[in-house]
Image (cartoon, helix red, strand yellow):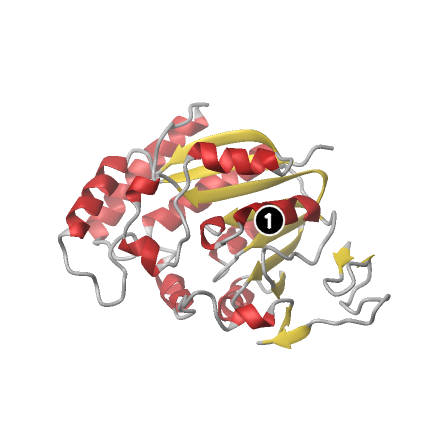
């Protein structure tokens, strides 16, 4: 069901006109906008980052490895969802992967910035796209699966966002999250991306269970590269900042990109054998709303 954010009436119709109060979202950049006041500002986050991400995602080992891991775990836990929402879809790189994974599903994507939605519309023209605030989701018991990948760390009130995702899920529906892990790995890249936090495993799981999710699966990833991540943080403290903030991850030599990609394949094979990692640069969690 759609949810009117003005009067909180839920309704089921093809357009966004609330049948009770007549409210209708404005359009921004050609997309329905439910938080237009936030689309133009978000703690100074530079929307031009989307253009930079769009140029590197398809070849960068981290983005490619995350997509492969997400595909496997989504299919394992949610083999046939009818309606899917990705919150914070950015340029649509993961959304494109979700479309390939679930070609028959009704797919929606959202972002706080319409600049990212423009790229997503090109990559996944069949998806329904909207601009919204993750702490005020205009749906109620609508989706079978909600994904949010490296988004929660950008949100001040992440607990409210988790509760909103729970409410937007059908009973028995589920969520898949990835977040950056280990506060001790905080770096200039986190600051450049305007992260609010890096998570501990305990913190994220407590917040999820606190709003009513049942945790089905949790693992760290980018685990075999953890020593390299630690070393890069130490080196970074003594190096001048890059002019564009891309100190790590987005700027990498082809040789290292290939080497790290190979290590991530080994890591996925280990997880595919049923093992999980206790530590790593990122954390993946699968949860479910009780039926």
Tell me the residue at 40%/63% (across/down).
54
Q: Position of residue 253 (x, y in %)?
A: 21, 54
- Find the residue positioned furthest to the left: 238
Q: Quadrant of residue 16?
A: bottom right
Asked if one can make out residue 35 in the rendered structure from this viewpoint, the answer is yes
Label 1, secondary structure: give it: helix
Q: Would you say 6 lies left or right of 54 here? A: right
Asked if one can make out residue 82 in the rendered structure from this viewpoint, the answer is no
Tell me the residue at 58%/52% (across/down).
86
Tell me the residue at 61%/47% (across/down).
146
Q: Position of residue 191 (x, y in %)?
A: 33, 57
- Find the residue positioned furthest to the right: 20
Q: Position of residue 67 (x, y in %)?
A: 45, 46
Category of crowding for the residue at label 1, using alpha-carbon neighbours closer than 10 angstroms: few (below 14), some (14–19), many (at least 20): some
Q: Quadrant of residue 33?
A: bottom right
Q: Is residue 102 above or below residue 182?
A: below
Q: Would you say 164 lies left or right of 207 here? A: right
Q: Position of residue 58 (x, y in %)?
A: 39, 56
Q: Would you say 228 lies left or right of 105 here? A: left
Could you tell me which quadrant the N terminus lies in?
Answer: bottom right
Q: Is residue 196 above or below residue 206?
A: below
Q: Which is nearer the eye, 210 or 148?
A: 210
Q: Is residue 43 above or below residue 77?
A: below
Could you tell me which quadrant the C terminus lies in?
Answer: top right
How many numbered marks are there? 1
**Residue occupied by mark 1:** 160
Q: Quadrant of residue 188?
A: bottom left
């Amino acid at each position: 069901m759609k949810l009117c954010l003005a009067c909180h009436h839920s309704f089921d119709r093809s357009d966004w006109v609330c049948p009770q109060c007549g409210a209708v979202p404005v359009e921004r950049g050609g997309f329905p906008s439910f938080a237009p006041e936030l689309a133009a500002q978000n703690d100074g986050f530079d929307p031009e980052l989307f253009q930079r991400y769009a140029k590197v995602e398809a070849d960068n080992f981290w983005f490619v490895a995350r997509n492969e891991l997400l595909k496997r775990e989504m299919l394992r836990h949610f083999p046939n969802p009818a309606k899917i929402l990705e919150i914070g879809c950015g340029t649509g790189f993961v959304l494109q992967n979700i479309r390939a994974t679930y070609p028959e599903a009704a797919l929606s994507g959202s972002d706080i910035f319409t600049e990212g939605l423009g790229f997503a519309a090109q990559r996944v023209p069949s998806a329904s796209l909207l601009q919204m605030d993750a702490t005020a989701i205009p749906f109620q018991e609508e989706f079978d699966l909600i994904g949010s990948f490296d988004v929660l760390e950008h949100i001040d009130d992440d607990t409210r966002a988790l509760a909103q995702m729970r409410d937007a899920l059908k009973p028995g529906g589920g969520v898949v999250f990835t977040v950056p892990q280990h506060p001790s790995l905080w770096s200039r890249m986190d600051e450049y991306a305007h992260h609010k936090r890096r998570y501990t495993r305990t913190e994220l799981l407590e917040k999820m269970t606190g709003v009513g999710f049942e945790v089905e699966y949790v693992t760290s990833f980018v685990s075999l590269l953890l020593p390299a991540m630690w070393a890069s943080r130490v080196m970074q403290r003594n190096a001048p900042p890059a002019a564009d903030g891309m100190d790590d991850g987005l700027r990498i030599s082809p040789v290292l990109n290939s080497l790290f990609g190979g290590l991530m394949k080994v890591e996925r094979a280990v997880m595919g054998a049923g093992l999980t990692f206790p530590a790593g640069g990122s954390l993946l969690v699968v949860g479910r709303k009780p039926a």
